[in-house]
Amino acid sequence: MKKGLLVGVVLVTSMFVFSSFAMAAIETSGTIEWKIYGSNEKIDGDEVASPIFKYGDVRMHYDVMLTTDSWEVLFAPRIRLDDDPQFIEDDGSYIKAYMNSSSVMFKPRLDYAVFDVYSGIADGEANIPKEPGINFDIPMKPLDMTLEAVVNSTAVYKNTGGTSGHGDMETKFNYGAGLTFAVAPLSVGVQFITTDVTSAIWYGSAYGAKLEVDLSPISLTAEFVNWSPEFSWCNDGSGVYGKVSYDLGAGLGNIALEYKGSDKNFNGVWMGPTDGDYSKLKGEYSYPLAQSVNMVVGVAKVNFGFGWGDFTEYELKFAASL
C-alpha cells in the first residue's frame, strides 16, 4: 500500500512538472565563432610562435530558455575545442524565480566580475571565486535603479584560509553588490566585491564605476576599478577601460576603438607588482557578411608589463547567430 502511494505521489508530481513545462514558452538562440589569430610577440628577445589556427578559437554557445509568468530556466552549454580537450562547459545556466518586486536566481557557476578592467597575470577582470551561488535582483522604483547582490561560499582549511591545507575546515562566504541607474542616454553603475579566501586570485576587495553613453550612431563606455588586496606583499592597484564605437549605418558595419590599462599592482594580482603597467589599444571593424553572419577584423598594440616590450596582435573572426 505504501509503495502504491509513493508511486501515485511520483506520478502526480511528474504530471505537474511536465504540465508546467508544457505551458512554458521556449526560446532558443546561440552563436558560433571561428577565429584566425596571430602576433609578433617576443619573450626576452626571442620570437613566440603564433599558430594561425587553434582549437580554442572555435567556440559555440547555444541557449535554451523556458519561461512562464513566475519563473525562467536557462540551459547554456559552452562548447569549446581546447588542447585538453574540455569539450563542453556550463557558464551561464540558471533558474530564476520572479516575485512581486524582485527576482532570485540560482546559478551553478557564479562569477561576479567588476566590469572589464583587465589584468595580464589573471587573464581577466577582478571577481569573486566562481562557485554555485544566489543572485538577487531588486528594482528600485520609481528611480529606475536596480540593486544586484550575489553570495556564494567556498570550503577552506582553517590552517591556511585557502582551498589547500590540512585539518579542520570552515566555510568562507564571498559577496558582490552592484547598483545601476539609467536615464537616456546615460547609464551609470557601481560594483563592489569581496572574498576572504586566501587562495582566491582577487583575495581582498575591489570596487568600480561604469559610465555608458548612447549617442547613436556613437556609443561610449568608460570604467574604473580599484583593488585592495589582503596579501601582505601586494599593494592597492587600479585600472581603466574605455571604448568608443561608431555605427556606419546602411549595412556598412561598425568601427570601434578600445583601451584596457592597469597599473603594476593590479596587473600583478596575487604575485606582486609586475615590471610595468599593462596596456592594450585595439581597433576593430565589424561587417555584416550576410543576415546573422558578421566578420570582425581587429588589430591591437599590447604590452603585458613583463618587460618584454610592445607587440602587435591581429585577428580575423567570423561569428554566426543561430
Image: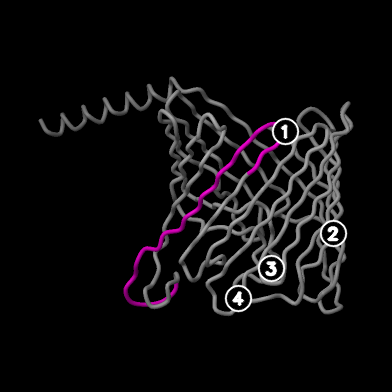
First in sequence, mark 4 or 1: give its number. 1
On the image, numbered disc 3 is attached to which residue? 267
Frontmost of labels 3 and 4 is 4
- The residues bearing labels 3 and 4 have C-alpha atoms spaced at a distance of 11 Å
- The residues bearing labels 2 and 3 have C-alpha atoms spaced at a distance of 19 Å
Disc number placed over residue 80 in the picture, else none: none
Q: Is residue 54 above or below residue 4?
A: below
Q: Secondary structure at mark 3?
A: helix
* Residue at far front of view: 143
On the image, numbered disc 4 is attached to which residue? 234
Disc number placed over residue 185 in the picture, else none: 1
Which residue is at 80% across, 76% downward? Answer: 307
Q: Position of residue 131 (x, y in %)?
A: 47, 55
On the image, numbered disc 2 is attached to which residue? 313
Q: Position of residue 136 (x, y in %)?
A: 46, 42
Question: Would you say the magenta stretch is mainly helix, strand or loop?
Answer: strand
Type of amino acid at the residue the image marks with label 1: Pro
First in sequence, mark 4 or 2: give its number. 4
